[in-house]
Image (spheres, rainbow, N blue to C red):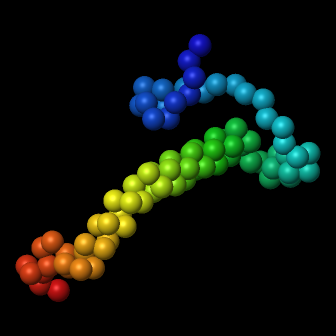
Amino acid sequence: MMIHDSSTPQYKNLKKATNLTLTIEVLAEAKKLGINISKACDAFLESLVRQEKERIWKQENAKFIAEYNQITEQEGLPLDKWRTF
């Protein structure tokens, strides 16, 4: 059984059936509007995963970023003397 893993290109288009519990009213409105529930859930979950990965990366690299910003404030940009604007 293959599991969808968007980080690996060869699995990009593979899908796996899953069960969801959705609010009845929202589901009915989405169907009435012709919204593809699977596509909408997949796109939203992909967005959440991307945001969470970004949050974790920022958290893991916060110390480096703060130190680099402090150095840049004190010393300026590394190639600043060649800047023409």
Q: Position of residue 70 (x, y in %)?
A: 31, 73
Tell me, yes or no, if residue 43 can be seen here. no
Q: Give me the residue at 74% from left, 48% from top.
A: 35
- Outermost residue on the top side: it is 1
Counting the numbered discs, the total is 0
As rendered, which of 46 and 51 lies closer to the eye? 51
Query: Residue 14 is drawn in which quadrant?
Result: top right
Which of the 4 quarters of the picture holds residue 83? bottom left
- Name above or below for residue 25 compared with residue 75: above
Q: Is residue 53 left or right of residue 23?
A: left
**Image location of residue 57, percent across then percent down:** 44, 51
Q: Can residue 56 be seen in the rendering of this structure?
A: yes
From the viewer's perspective, tell me whether residue 29 is left or right of residue 57: right
Pick out the residue farthest to the left: 82
Q: Is residue 6 left or right of residue 23?
A: left
Is residue 52 placed above or below 80 in the rendered structure?
A: above
Where residue 34 appears, as percent x and y from the top left, is 77, 48
In the displayed image of the protein, which residue is found farthest to the bottom?
A: 85
Q: Quadrant of the N terminus?
A: top right
Q: Nearer the viewer, residue 78 or 82?
A: 78
Quadrant for the C terminus, please. bottom left
Q: Taking 7 as reference, is 3 above or below it?
A: above
Picture residue at 48% right of the left edge, 55% below the top = 59
Which residue is at 48% across, 26% downward? Answer: 11
Instruction: Provide residue 8's location: percent of width, then percent of height.
Output: 43, 30
Q: Taking 81 as reference, is 40 above or below it?
A: above
